[in-house]
Amino acid sequence: MQQPMNMQNQQTTMQQPPGVVSTKDSLYLTDMMSWNLLSAKKAHFFAGQCQDPELKTAAETCGQMHQRHYQQLLSHLGQHANEQQPMNNMQ
């Protein structure tokens, strides 16, 4: 029995994250962390080069945002690793 076309393209939302991070997800998380770290470094560099106080403040704010995102990802990954740790010790 064939489903209507609009039902086939709908995605379901997970209620809880999976217990295992796939290789593809791990690579994507690594990319996101790299992008945020690089953006934070670039914004910090540009803020140091700016003569205009408004631009300098905007670059610093941007850099802080990217640094915060990087730290949040790192924190989430660290929590996940800590949750998995007891199971690894039982082996």
Image (spheres, rainbow, N blue to C red):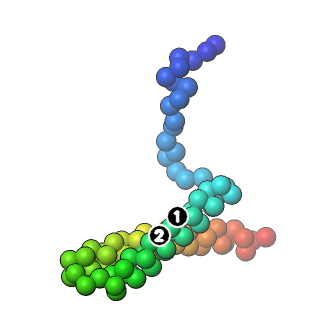
In this view of the protein, which residue sits in the foreground, 41 or 85?
A: 41
Image coordinates of residue 62 in percent, x first then y, are 33, 72
Task: Spot the residue most to the top.
Answer: 1
Residue 80 appears anywhere in the view: no
Mark 1 → mark 2, Cα distance in angstroms: 6 Å
Instruction: Name the image quarter holding the C terminus.
Output: bottom right
Horizontal side of residue 47 vs 24, given as left or right: left
Residue 14 appears anywhere in the view: yes
Q: Who's the residue at 61% across and 70% down the image?
A: 81
Q: Which residue is mark 2?
A: 36
Give, as a three-letter code, the residue at label 2: Asn
Q: Are marks 1 and 2 in contact (CB under 8 Å)?
A: yes
Image coordinates of residue 18 in percent, x first then y, are 60, 52
Write down the quadrant of residue 2 in the picture. top right
* In the rendered image, the vertical position of residue 23 relative to residue 78, given as above or below: above
In this view of the protein, which residue sits in the foreground, 2 or 58?
A: 58
Give, as a three-letter code, the residue at label 1: Met
Write down the quadrant of residue 3 in the picture. top right
SS type, badge 2: helix
Horizontal side of residue 49 vs 20, given as left or right: left
**Mark 1 residue crowding within 10 angstroms, few (<14) / some (14–19) / many (20+):** some
Q: Who's the residue at 64% across and 13% down the image?
A: 1
SS type, badge 1: helix
In this view of the protein, which residue sits in the foreground, 56 or 62?
A: 56
Q: Which mark is residue 32?
A: 1
